[in-house]
Amino acid sequence: MVTPPRDPGVRAEAPVSSGEHEITGRLIALADDRRPVGADVRRQVLAALFRLLVQRREPNAETLQHGLRLTTERLNRALGARGSFLLLLDASVKEAEVITAALAEPSDPSARERRESRAQALVGARLRAIQLGLLPEVQPPLRQTELSEEETPLALKHSLRGECAPLAVVPVSVSQRLEGLLVLLGRTSGRAYSQPELEFCQEVARHLVRGLQRSLGLGSPLSDDEKGQCVAVLADVDWWDPPEDFEPDLDLLDELGERLLARNSILPLLRSGRGLEVALGNPLDAQAIDAFELASGLQVRKRFASTPARVRGFLKRAFPNLEDEASDEGPNLQGDLVAQLAQGLGEFEDTDPFQYTFNETIDERSSPIVRLASKIVEDAYFRGASDIHVEASEHAVVVRHRVDGTCRERVQLPAAAARPLVARFKIMSDLDVAEHRLPQDGRIDYRRYNRELPIDLRVSILPMLHGEWVCLRILEKKRSALPLDELGFSSYNLDRYRQALRTPYGLILHCGPTGAGKSMTLYAALNEINDPRLKIVTAEDPIEYVLAGIGQLQIKRSIGLDFSKALRSFLRHDPDVILVGEIRDTETAQIAVDASLTGHLLLSTLHTNDA
């Protein structure tokens, strides 16, 4: 374990013999907080770097530098640090070179470019190590770039030992050898770093150095366990390190069967009723978990990450005739797995430059495409998008989000991904996979694919010049119950709107562009006036939210059931309130006006540029 110096202001002695080095530096004080860094923060900081470490393809210099810088920037954001610098020591351990540098985001957006240039000016600077584990000293000239004392103490007229900012230096050991130093500037809040935070920084720095060594062909390659632990972080599951005396439940393994367990690389650890704890050789393959649960009738309640070789080794105790994997697949399977993640899923990081390489044999049911489709949906949901656009062009498939009414490009996929990805969305929405000439509309109940995400997706497929386009409208069910006073109305407009909803007849039109919140306002209004004393009916295309106590009709143009026909039928059912999802033609508009003048309250929407 890393041990802090007794007095942060006093230089430490030489490094301890165990290979771990003391965290030293000019800290105002060491915070008393002993809480470990959370798993979410750890995954967020390390995700991009771990993909570099475990994928089989060697990263080029540009990709490596971007991955290192992205990791240090995320570390700064996670800790609230003013900046951080990674230094790699030479063989003599007397000099160090700045490998990557990142400064905190400035409050003024116009200063961002200046911040980037000043951070990059530090890269390549040669520093002199005064003593192992201590602050290095600047060896001028640094660069022909003026660096302000406020942004970084690495200025021409200052040494890092100067009283210019609170600092922490984190020694980086790989295989019990001091390889580098991570220098942390003070926090923007002025609060000191805690010991668990510094230990986390040491872990991050160690992985940064491993990534650099790998690109240079230095150091030993990652072991299966190290790759597995990286995958565990990416998959957001705990790493399973079995005790020496661990023995699998042979009766349970025999009950589930060799084929089911080996095919999905699953080792059952503990059974409780219909629930299981399992170790996974492939923790990123959600399809394998779903297939296992469906075939076994059991529910996986806790997952652990392992390696394919370890899972297979324990399975062979129950099934001695289980065939071995090909000799070259064992050490590479984890790398292949995360290469797929980087190629199919891992691109959902801001400006990550990792490249996709889709094989032409991938189809709509293959695991990378299944996970990619799910990742596209979940990424958009957690970013607050109202719509997802998957658009095929001549050379790429562009994924865009509509956030706050504006479309923003998220990522580009290779053109080879277009057909299987569109086919996957068709399968999820029960549409005709073989139909490529006509538009199709459908709906996805996403809880079938992720029970923790209570959303529906309205799906529209449109054949275009270079392939089919997909538009997915995200319908979050829990949002449908939002009260009107949480939708952002001013108090004056809210009072007027509620007064209009209480009138016994009339027409209330909700106008605005796509994604402006028209449907959300409609459903909030229905929840507001929903009362057993009123008969409320709706005509929708499609039904976006299911409302208790309200009659909802799905428009089906394929059989001639459009809005105008639904409205005529509604008038013969003695309704008090009618909701028409959208007025698209003159006939529907005329019937809506007539209904509002004959004792009915009618709610509808119009697509317009503004209200």
Image (cartoon, grey):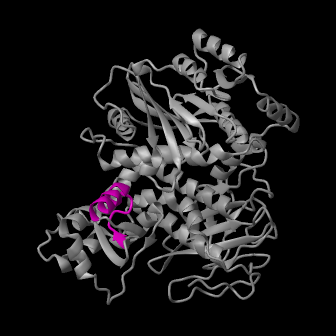
User: Taking 451 as reference, is 164 above or below it?
Assistant: below
User: Given the current orientation, which residue lies at the most extreme right position?
Assistant: 492
Rendered image quadrant of residue 573: top right
> Is residue 125 among the parts visible in the rendering?
no
Left or right of 593: which side holds 93? left
Rendered image quadrant of residue 76: bottom right
Give the x, y percent position of residue 177.
Answer: 48, 78
User: Taking 503 as reference, is 152 above or below it?
Assistant: below
Q: Nearer the viewer, residue 330 or 318?
A: 318
Residue shown at 64%/34% (left/top)? 535
Q: The C terminus appears in which quarter of the rendering?
A: top right
Rendered image quadrant of residue 492: top right
Magenta stretch encompasses residue 33: no
Left or right of 365: which side holds 493? right
Q: Nearer the viewer, residue 368 or 79?
A: 368
User: Taking 153 as reference, is 14 above or below it?
Assistant: below
Give the x, y percent position of residue 314.
Answer: 25, 78
Give the x, y percent position of residue 395.
Answer: 39, 28
Write the start and end of the magenta stretch as one range.
Answer: 277-296
Numbered label tally: 0
Magenta stretch encompasses residue 293: yes
